[in-house]
Image (cartoon, helix red, strand yellow):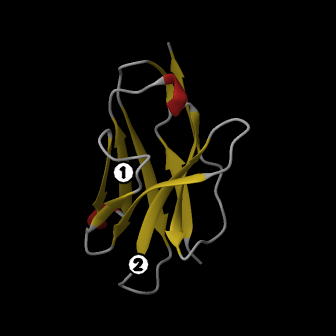
Amino acid sequence: EVTLVESGGGLVQAGGSLRLSCIASGFTEDDYAISWFRQAPGKEREGLSCITSAGRPSYTDSAKGRFTISSDNAKNMVYLQIDNLKPEDTAVYYCNTIPLGPWGAGTQVTVSS
């Protein structure tokens, strides 16, 4: 069973940066993909970025420019760097496999103006 745990969120001022972490375990196949999502208060969950087990990244339009996804396969970690944070980035951030599995608790990011 694949398990994913997010961490790294917090309260940050606008213009700051955060690096979110997702530790993944339980994969039985060598070929997989992990994506980052977020859900802001009162809004639907939206996809941000995805990275394959081969390290190939992709971004939705919402994440192009300020978001960088990376991975460290030796540590079973996937990261999401967010730069120049804005108040509208306030959300709970989740990682999940593609295809989607169960959702974890996520990590809260709050950006103050």
- At x 28%, y 60%, the residue is 72
Type of amino acid under label 1? Tyr
According to the image, label 1 marks what residue? 79
Type of amino acid under label 2? Tyr
Quick one: quadrant of the N terminus? bottom right
Q: Is residue 62 above or below residue 58?
A: above
Q: Residue furthest top?
A: 113
- At x 36%, y 20%, the residue is 15
Residue 50 lies, in percent from the top left, at 40, 63
Residue 82 lies, in percent from the top left, at 36, 37
According to the image, label 2 marks what residue? 32
Q: Secondary structure at mark 1?
A: strand
- At x 54%, y 63%, the residue is 96
Q: CA distance from mark 1 to mark 2?
A: 15 Å
Q: Residue furthest front?
A: 61
Give the side of residue 70 with respect to residue 97, left or right.
left
Label 1 Cα neighbours within 10 Å, binned few <14 / some 14-19 / many ≥20: many
